Amino acid sequence: MSILGEHPQKITEKSLSYLLSLTRLDIEGSSMTRLAALSVIHQLITIDPTGDVRTLFLTNGILEQVLMEFDFGFESEENSTFLEVSLNILWNLSKLAICPVQPLISEVVFRRLMLLFDSTSSFYTFSSQFTSTVKSLCENKHLVGHVSPCTISVRVKEDITKATRGMLRTVSNFPTEVHVCTLYDTNDPDNEIDLTAHLVSNKLAWPLDTKSKPNQQKEDESENAWKDVIVTEVISGPYFWAHIGIETIENMRKIQNLLLLEYSSGRLHQMSCVKGDLIVVAKERDGEVFLFRAEVLSRKPQEVRVWALDYGFVVDVAVDNVMNVYGTPNNLNLPPQIKLCSIQGVQAQPRDSLMVKLSGAILCNLTQKSIPAGDVILKLDGFETLQKFIEISPDQDTNTEVLKLITNLSYGERKRRKWLETDMIPVLLGKTMDQTNKLTLQNILYCLTNLIIRCDEARAKFYHSQGIDTILTVLITSQRNSSVSRAAIHLLKEKKSNHMKSEMDKLLQEMSDVRLKRGEIQYAIPEDRLSHNFSHDSREAIRPELADIGQHPPTKQQLLDMIEGRQSSDLDPVPINACAKTFDNKKYFIKDQIVDIQTDSLHELRPNKTLSTVSASLISTHVCGMLNNRKGGEIIFGLSTISKAEGLKASRDDRDEFRLGVDRMMTDKLSPPALHSLFDMEYHQVVEDNEDSERLIPIPDLYIIVIRIKPSKGSLYTMKRDNTSYIRFGSTTALLSMQDLRNLVILEEEDRYRSQIIELRHKLQEH
């Protein structure tokens, strides 16, 4: 129940004025009072079924105060609660009808909301937990890294200046390059750590796909790019100082030994210094004297602030600890031995993804109600900001809300043509293959449909971005008649220009689940799918549908029948029948005999002599082809290309390990994973035929090994490494082309509407 009673819509003018006056306090120490007042207002408008309370607050100036608290919370992570409450109030206000909501449709509101999607804004930052994690994993450790130097940018200089509070701004030896590093901790062979993968998987940073950046300096792929790395000081976020390469590490040992020698022999003397001087610092640590070279940053009467040339840290030392560096051996006059470095493959993430989601929901509500709202976002260059966000964001729940917003913004020719100036179409196509959230994938398809409808230039861009192939792949790997498959089919139909549609296309269009009728608003999806709803509980995550492995369109059989030019049959795999004799009631092969098995559509002979020469990648390709050919087959090891039973050496341990390797191959290399019910393995002894004694003598550890693939129906299997599919044709395993997949879609549509099409054709002929 509300703290003001069961009927918050009856709030008195006095109570309203009091709450608003509390939000306007601007005296020292009033922030908590303002936050409390905003929280009460948020509670009141959340349980306002008629909208009267929200309208009352809006007409009495609540928007101005909310925007002030938005700015206050946006500036500092410490004040994020103010930002969250402000966004929740705006979200509740955005659900009002079109007339009272008009004050929200303005540049001052939209500019603030769009900041939450701008990855260059201060809302995107590396957290203190990120920095502490990097320190614990890297600092003072001997690591291995792939290192690529590049010229330091203005942005990096600004980040370093901010992290060090400007202390290094005047350093004379500040580097001109930053070394981008992919770091690995290999000290524990059983627990090697990829630093980038660790930070991303623990949601401390977003992944950064540097390969897709056109201006990114090309990585050095040579072996020389791999270096020994000792991290000496983590600055903040992804930046750190480090010794790179064995030569530098050896130089540091020499410098340390020389400093100790000079100090112990009494040749280092105390000296006075000024800003910019190069000195040696003698600082006691853990009962021992630690010596290092440094540059003076500032000077106080009894204290000197210095920057360690070979380590990167800044420290205050007593003037008594400052030693001269002049007159020392030449080896001590070497340049600084540290390099400025940055972690490869990470980028700052938003302070709170829920706030980004709320911002997207607010804009969704407003753009659904008002076409001019989209024009405001267009004027603020918001289309480019949203494209960039979708491109870099791995957060599928947040992306779903942003995709709904983009779908709303793609209504209207002017906006659609503005999207053409961006890379949104290829970005969305690239995102389709990364989605595990079916709702996100469905909204990507809705976006693409709206972007290409009634726009030949957009259709051309879709086509040249391999859009047809990409969406066909989505269709093949989705459940039949699911929301995703229906959205994909509708998108492929929309891809065709109106004047290119055949009579059958028009008939299918009439029968489509999603229709466009003359005289209606031309949304590419039903109007009720345009996004104006955010979860009633703004913190409730959208739950993805459960995956159903293997339940893909069954019309793959029709495709295969069409390709091979025959009707479907129940042909079973041909069993191995190598010889007429039996040995201990088991099938066996006689050494060097020619057997009646050859490489064909059901058999692949592999003449390997040892298991160590078996390639999992090659074998998995043949497995993929046999799973996709509807009949299965057998992969046989130990038979030569001329069908001679030569056998394959395999001890008991080898056979056990091979079985485990095949199990891993079926799950790690195929998508969907091949279930155990779809394959089995057999080991057949190779024997010698002793004609004198008419006895069969087993040859130790020599076998013919068979992987038997059982007939599979209803799934299209692909290779995880590159999302390609294969099929067994005759004696070869061939790549399943996209033309074959296109045929699959045609067959699916024909099968689905065959009776209706025939009936409609008869009616057309009668008329």
Image (cartoon, helix red, strand yellow):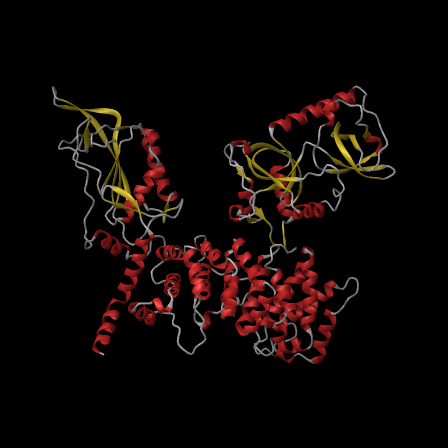
Q: Quadrant of the C terminus?
A: bottom left
- Horizontal side, residue 490 vs residue 59: left or right: left
Extreme residue in the right direction: 301
Up-down: is 547 above or below 452? Answer: above
- Horizontal side, residue 348 vs residue 434: left or right: right
**Residue toward you, 7 or 439:** 439
Q: Residue at x 23, y 70 (%)?
A: 758
Up-down: is 711 above or below 71? Answer: above
Q: Residue at x 25, y 73 (%)?
A: 760
Query: Residue 704: where, in percent of width, then height?
Result: 24, 32
Residue 396 can be seen in this image: yes
Instruction: Classify residue 344 by image quadrant.
Output: top right
Q: Quadrant of the N terminus?
A: bottom right
Q: Residue at x 62, y 69 (%)?
A: 90
Q: Residue at x 57, y 67 (%)?
A: 363
Query: Residue 20: where, in percent of width, then height?
Result: 71, 73
Instruction: Classify residue 42 by image quadrant.
Output: bottom right
Residue 1 can be seen in this image: no
Q: How many marks?
A: 0
Instruction: Classify residue 592 by image quadrant.
Output: top left
Query: Residue 438: where, in percent of width, then height?
Result: 43, 59
Up-down: is 459 above or below 12? Answer: above
Query: Residue 63: where, in percent of width, then height?
Result: 67, 71
- Horizontal side, residue 327 vs residue 155: left or right: right
